[in-house]
Image (cartoon, rainbow, N blue to C red):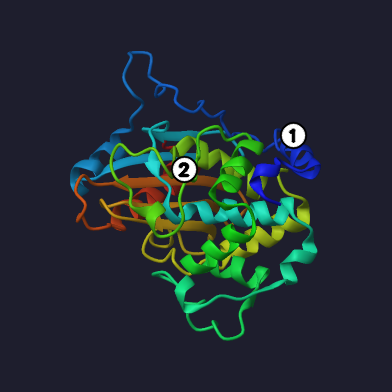
Amino acid sequence: MDSREGLSRRAVLAGAAAGAVTVGLPATAAAGSAPQRSAGGEERVDEEFTELERTYRRRLGVVAINARTGATLEHRPDERFPICSVFKVLLAARILRDFPSSVRDRRLTWTADDLVINSPVTEVTIRNGLTVSQLVEAAVTVSDNTATNLLMREFGGPAGVTGFARSVGDPVTRIDRWEPEMSTGAPGDERDTTSPRAIARTFGTLVLGSALPRADRRLLTTWMLANRTAGPVFGSGVPAGWKLADKTGSGWYGVRNDVGITWTPDGVPLVVAAFTRGTHYEDDTLSEPIAAVAESACRRLTGGDV
């Protein structure tokens, strides 16, 4: 379906059902609205995360939610940050929800001219191509950029992903460009951005809620559980033995992101969204503050230290 044709009836019905999401996921501020403030008029910040900003000299955005109790940690929750490859989960979910399952077996082919940076799967499968399902798996599990572009070309482009976000109640997240340009992350550029609150709620809706049919939700979660890029970020902060289904992202200007759901050994889900950015084009992408956010969220949201 081309995005210009609008949402299918299936998409509209699924989007309406997504409102009945899990306990504890807060409402999202509308696109373009001012950041939410504390009673004293200050933007919501967290002391522990403020210290991480000082230590790593990066601006940090965090929302972490215990989806069972509703306990929440927030730090610049409504500020826009570059979304980078985190959006690939939304692309995958859109394909699962809005198109017949038969399209997943369709084989797509490409040429060397289609290849872009960070394409570890598609650069070695160019001869025979891959199915849509295999391309989605490559986009989610190893963040293959060419796979992502091929899927967007086939299924409505950046506007299709933005429309999907709106259909599941996310008024903030927007996708405007293709890989790798969409990951530049220039300060002040609202293209290809989200907010920690918006994307945390959207991921929670997709993985824990009813935005997707059950079988599709399980498949999306399986791909996210198989993510191979989480090791330095959430993978280093989540306690051993906890399940983690996430998607990472990185870009220029020191942008580093991770968003996902982790489950305690007794099955309590935590939704965590963590974003960092620097100020200069050449700033290094740092994984350590993202890992520290995951450690803090898991500790504080399950141990009463909120």
Residue bearing mark 2: 303
* Between 209 and 133, the one nearer to me in the picture: 133
Q: From the viewer's perspective, is residue 76 above or below residue 97?
A: above
Residue that extends furthest to the top in the rendered view of this protein: 40
Residue 144 seen:
no
Q: CA distance from mark 2 to mark 1?
A: 35 Å
Residue bearing mark 1: 16
Check disc 1 and report its element: helix, strand or loop.
Answer: helix
Asked whether disc 2 touches disc 1, contact meaning CB atoms under 8 Å apart, the reply is: no
Q: Residue at x 67, y 69 (%)?
A: 133
Q: From the viewer's perspective, is residue 252 above or below residue 22?
A: below
Q: What label sits on residue 237 in the rendered view? A: none
Q: Residue at x 38, y 62 (%)?
A: 236
Where's residue 216, x and y in %?
73, 57
Q: From the viewer's perspective, is residue 72 above or below residue 157?
A: above
* Between 297 and 29, the one nearer to me in the picture: 29
Which is more foreground, mark 2 or mark 1? 1
Residue 159, image quadrant: top right
How would you rate the neighbour count of disc 2 (Cα within 10 Å): few for under 14, some for 14-19, many for 20 or more? few
* Between 270 and 164, the one nearer to me in the picture: 164
* Between 145 and 169, the one nearer to me in the picture: 145
Residue 152 seen:
yes
> What amino acid is labelled 1 in the image?
Ala
Residue that extends furthest to the bottom in the rendered view of this protein: 127
Query: Closer to the N terminus: mark 2 or mark 1?
Result: 1
Check disc 2 and report its element: helix, strand or loop.
Answer: loop
Where's residue 28, x and y in %?
53, 29
In the displayed structure image, the side of residue 190 where residue 283 appears, left or right: left
Where's residue 52, x and y in %?
26, 44
Residue 155, image quadrant: bottom right
In the displayed structure image, the side of residue 254 where residue 13 appears, left or right: right
